[in-house]
């Protein structure tokens, strides 16, 4: 087994620690959003409110992009892992899927298509804006 140079080890450890702190900061924004939703009696998920606040702070330059990029990239890379508990929980509703399976399948299919199309359009809009092109 090849040993890593101490500086390389420290560099990797530093990157991991930075990502962990950034994930903690993202979690704090979600918690703050939950608090706001509860206090203001909003009918929106608190995590969505927290991420909206973070988006505004990033857009205004109050929170630098570098403060959340590593943690955000890690969360996006491991996103599929976060869906496993949801899929396992759905297995408790076998009877519902027997009765309404086709309707649920169509809703999931339509929702997926809407998310894919809107994500693609948003990404294209952002890239075109960044590179100075129009659609």
Image (spheres, rainbow, N blue to C red):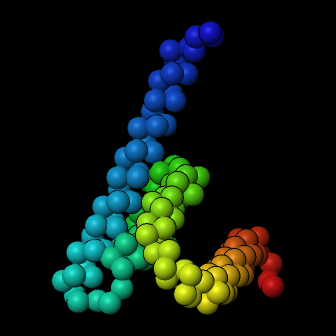
Position of residue 75 measured from the top left corner of the image (x, y, whole percent):
51, 54
- Say which of 4 and 78 sits in front: 78
Q: Residue furthest left?
A: 39
* Whether residue 70 is visible: yes
Residue found at x 50% / y 15%? 6
Q: Quadrant of the C terminus?
A: bottom right
Residue found at x 39% / y 60%? 26
The answer to which image quadrant residue 101 occupies is bottom right
Position of residue 67 measured from the top left corner of the image (x, y, whole percent):
44, 54
Residue found at x 27% / y 70%? 32
Position of residue 120 measured from the top left corner of the image (x, y, whole percent):
72, 76
Q: Is residue 49 above or below residue 100?
A: above
**In the displayed structure image, the side of residue 116 where residue 99 appears, left or right:** left
The answer to which image quadrant residue 111 occupies is bottom right
The number of discs equals 0
Q: Is residue 127 above or below residue 77?
A: below
Position of residue 49 measured from the top left corner of the image (x, y, whole percent):
37, 78
Q: Is residue 55 above or below residue 117?
A: above
- Say which of 78 and 37 sits in front: 78
The answer to which image quadrant residue 133 occupies is bottom right
- Say which of 59 and 97 sits in front: 97
**In the displayed structure image, the side of residue 134 where residue 21 appears, left or right:** left
Q: Quadrant of the N terminus?
A: top right
**In the displayed structure image, the side of residue 119 where residue 34 appears, left or right:** left
* Whether residue 73 is visible: no
């Amino acid at each position: 087994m090849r040993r890593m140079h101490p500086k390389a080890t420290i560099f990797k450890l530093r990157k991991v620690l930075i990502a962990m702190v950034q994930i903690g900061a993202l979690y704090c924004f979600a918690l703050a959003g939950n608090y706001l939703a509860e206090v203001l009696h909003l009918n929106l998920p608190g995590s969505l409110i927290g991420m909206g606040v973070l988006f505004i702070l990033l857009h205004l330059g109050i929170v630098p992009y570098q403060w959340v990029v590593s943690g955000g990239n890690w969360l996006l890379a491991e996103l599929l892992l976060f869906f496993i508990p949801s899929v396992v929980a759905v297995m408790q509703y076998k009877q519902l899927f027997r009765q309404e399976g086709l309707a649920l399948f169509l809703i999931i299919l339509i929702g997926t298509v809407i998310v894919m199309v809107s994500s693609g359009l948003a990404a294209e809009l952002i890239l075109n804006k960044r590179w100075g092109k129009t659609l």
